[in-house]
Image (cartoon, helix red, strand yellow):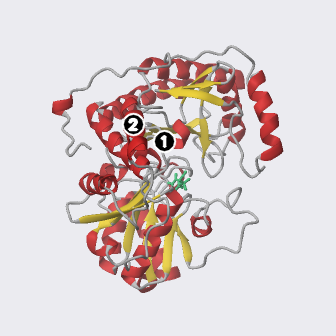
Amino acid sequence: MTDTIDADANAASAPVYTVTQERKIVTAIPGPRSQELQARRTAVVSEGVASALPVYIERANGAILVDVDGNQFVDFGAGIGVTTVGHTEERVVEAAASQLQDVIHTLFTITPYEEYVRVAELLAERTPGNWSKKSVLVNSGAEAVENGVKIARKYTGRRAVAVLDHAYHGRTNLTMAMNYKAHPYATGFGPFAGDVYHAPNSYPYRDGLSGADAAARTIAYLEKVVGATDLACLVVEPIQGEGGFIVPADGFLGILQNWCTEQGVVMIADEIQSGMARTGAFFASEHFEWEPDLVLTAKGIAGGLPLAAVTGRAEIMDAAQPGGLGGTFGGNPVACAAAVAVFESIDRNRLLAEAQRIERTLLAGLARLAERYDVIGDIRGKGAMIAIELVQPGTGRSSKQPYPEAVGSLIAFAAERGVLFLNAGTYGNVLRFLPSLAVSDALIDDALQVLDDGFAALG
Ligand code: PMP
């Protein structure tokens, strides 16, 4: 295993791609082989598992997905922000393959191994805050959220959990109660966990509030509706993901952290979508000079293998009794080896700078589109986490009526031409750009041209 990451000693070399980095459509979408697979799937896979685009993927590399019919898609979803270092990134593949030969599983809570410890060391180094930190590794984002809440409750001895409007935290029982949107995540799946409170967020495009005013509104809610002395934790995505890449107004997060610290509330950053170099900083919290008590990571941490973590102040993390945290697969050695390779790739491939490049290219291209298409009400985000919010024609300066139909049409239009975009937003009217950091400017420009044609076709 590599003990230290030294970016200078490992100067960036041009990535080698095993799939040409271009879009290519050779059949109708979905193609015949995908349609056959879809028919088999319909017979045996629960209808509860939906797929945005039923093309079956055979290979993936860099920023490109190749389906079973030979179509190539430029991937602006990255498995919802997972393959941040690129699909099948060579170091990740090598590290995971080598680990498969050595040891696949022991269970860290029975007989431990170095890779788990190394991931915890890297998380302690890279998460915001210059204090002693510890971690627990788990399998999924929702499991990280659940564990963060458990730890905060044990540490504070308090019961209540607060989240923000437009939040998304997962599909387990507790996290269903923490999401803003009931449908489709929670509808019919209750009863839900109690003691979860939804406080107002900061949504500059729609509320027009400064960070200080939005934070005052949030704090007033928490003090009146919950009561600080009963509040264990406030869980916040620094940039809200499924909610529509909502970037809070400056100052909002810092004021909330100060209030939490004064009141003995644990403030938890859900960096599951925004973390791991995605936004041009290692963690999105850094853009807001926010140093959270606990940080949740998942998605991008292991290049596509399932791994997640709760990392934070050692005294909070140690509040859990021995045996209280863990699980059979949590911190699997193969996923941990891949995660170590992800940390190395971020440094060696200078991926923070790549995310900043992607932000510049996307923002410039989208600004040009917004001059011509007034349905683009807002352009926002950071790094490779950028979104446009679409509003009904002529309402952008007044009522900002959501226009989800346009998002649906644009996504379908682009998919048929080999570009995979995702939607987002409480009102379904946000188109998000969440590519891997391997996506070139040429691929971005190409995708934006497809989007331009899609806007023109909207009429
Ligand atoms: N939190 C955030 C911010 C997320 O974006 C997600 C996944 N979209 C989750 C939690 C849940 O993660 P998982 O799907 O791995 O359980």
Q: Which amino acid, mark 1?
A: Gly
> Could you tell me the amino acid type at mark 2?
Val
What residue would you read off at disc 2? 92
Q: Is residue 393 visible?
A: no
Instruction: Tell me: 78 left or right of 99.
Output: right
Instruction: Estimate the spatial distance between the alpha carbons at disc 1 and disc 2, rounded to whole Å.
Output: 9 Å
Instruction: Name the one closer to the observer, 82 or 383.
Output: 82
Q: Residue 298 location in percent, x, y?
A: 45, 52
Q: Residue furthest left?
A: 9
> Which residue is found at the position 30% from the left and 51% from the top?
286
Q: Secondary structure at mark 2?
A: helix
Q: Which quadrant of the structure image shows residue 166? A: bottom right
Question: What x and y, as percent, mark residue 154?
Answer: 41, 81
- Sequence order check, earlier mark of 1 and 2: 2
The secondary element bearing badge 1 is classed as: loop
Report the residue marked by disc 1.
304
Residue at coordinates 50% horizontally, 15% vertically from top-left?
20
